[in-house]
Amino acid sequence: MKKNVDPERMCCACRQKKPKSQLWRIVSGPEGARLDPTGKADGRGCYVCRQPDCIRKLRRRKTGLRQLVVSSLREICDELLRKAGEP
Ligand SMILES: [Zn+2]
């Protein structure tokens, strides 16, 4: 039987636990941070709600995400905001 697993992860902007399907995963790689659309890429990752509020909050952060490169994090957040339909 196929299990419908949707484990909870913590959003690193609002610190609420949500099902993974409601979060974006951002993973750090050799070239900086990037979006992980599959949620399965190797590397240290963080999660953020698929909501403009949380994406903006994450974009403003300068600390607490040592494993992620801040400049690429900004680009990713901009991309996510576009996906969320925000300018
Ligand atoms: Zn959040």
Image (cartoon, helix red, strand yellow):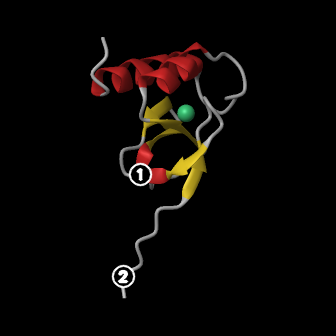
State the separation of the CA atoms marked 2 and 1.
17 Å
Dot 2 or dot 1: first in sequence order is: 2
45 lies above or below 63 = below
- Residue 71 visible within the image: yes
Ligand 1 visible in quadrant:
top right
* Crowdedness near tag 2: few (<14), some (14–19) or many (≥20) residues, C-alpha within 10 Å: few
Which amino acid type corresponds to the residue marked 1 in the rendered image? Ser
Q: Position of residue 7 (x, y in %)?
A: 53, 61
Under mark 2, the amino acid is Lys
Which type of secondary structure does the marked residue at label 2 adopt?
Answer: loop
For the point 42% across and 35% down, the residue is 50
In this view, 62 is above or below 51: above
Which residue in the protein does label 1 denote? 21
Q: Residue at x 48, y 17 (%)?
A: 74
Mark 2 — residue? 2
Q: Position of residue 28 (x, y in %)?
A: 55, 37
Please tell me in which quadrant of the rendered image residue 11 appears: top right
Of 50 and 28, nearer the camera is: 50
The secondary structure type at the circle numbered 1 is helix
Residue nearest the observer in this picture, 30 or 86? 86
